Image (spheres, grey):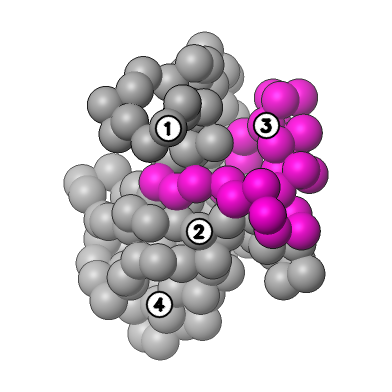
Amino acid sequence: MIIEGYAALFGVADQMADIVRAGAFARAQAPLPMYVEHEKRLRAGVWSHVREDARGLYVRGEIDDNLPGAARAKRMIARGIDGLSIGFVPVVAHKTIAGRSLDDVELLEVSIVTNPMQPLARLSARAKFIGARPDAKPEATFAGRAHARLTLARAINRAA
């Protein structure tokens, strides 16, 4: 199963009031491990495409059925769980009034999670491929919930 989405968004405070700045992932390279709920023992696949764009950190990868976390990851996605979360070490971070500004981070992994720290860090699509057709279309998307999450993120930012 191929999945993709944004693991972090630039300029959007997370639940700990940390804000990732553009350029923070400039050194990030694929492949990166894909875990379930940041559990190393639940490796589910690999992120084969990792890039920064104007919005944030975009990732695309494949769940590997031969890995111990694959079945759980697929069950979560089938139930509509679409959260993404980054595992990282801050390299350059500045304290702000409410939290931190993350200017440079060492990206260690990206996990599929039930409750992401950054409410808008979500899968945008999933696709089950027959063979390995990179032009296949996603069979389902999570875009329908974007408005509710954007409203929540704005409320969190206003409160911060």
Q: Nearer the viewer, residue 93 or 82?
A: 82
Instruction: Check whether the beta carbons of the residues at disc 3 and disc 2 lie within 8 A of each other.
Output: no
| Tag in front: 1 or 2 | 1
Q: Which residues are magenta?
A: 60-85
Q: Position of residue 72 (x, y in %)?
A: 78, 44
Badge number at residue 77: 3
Residue positioned 28% across, 43% down in the render: 55
Which residue is identified by label 4?
105
Q: Within the magenta stretch, is there residue 75?
A: yes
Q: Position of residue 158 (x, y in %)?
A: 51, 39
Disc 1 residue type?
Gly
Q: Residues within 10 Å of mark 2 (few under 14, many from 20)?
A: many
Element at badge 3?
Answer: helix
Q: CA distance from mark 1 to mark 2?
A: 17 Å
Q: Residues within 10 Å of mark 4 (few under 14, many from 20)?
A: many
Q: CA distance from mark 4 to mark 1?
A: 35 Å
| Tag in front: 4 or 3 | 3
Instruction: Check whether the beta carbons of the residues at disc 1 and disc 3 lie within 8 A of each other.
Output: no
Left or right of 39 on screen, residue 160? left
Residue positioned 51% across, 75% down in the render: 108
Q: Quadrant of the N terminus?
A: top right
Q: CA distance from mark 2 to mark 4?
A: 19 Å
Q: Position of residue 37 (x, y in %)?
A: 73, 56
Disc 2 residue type?
Val
Which residue is identified by label 2?
46
Element at badge 1?
Answer: loop
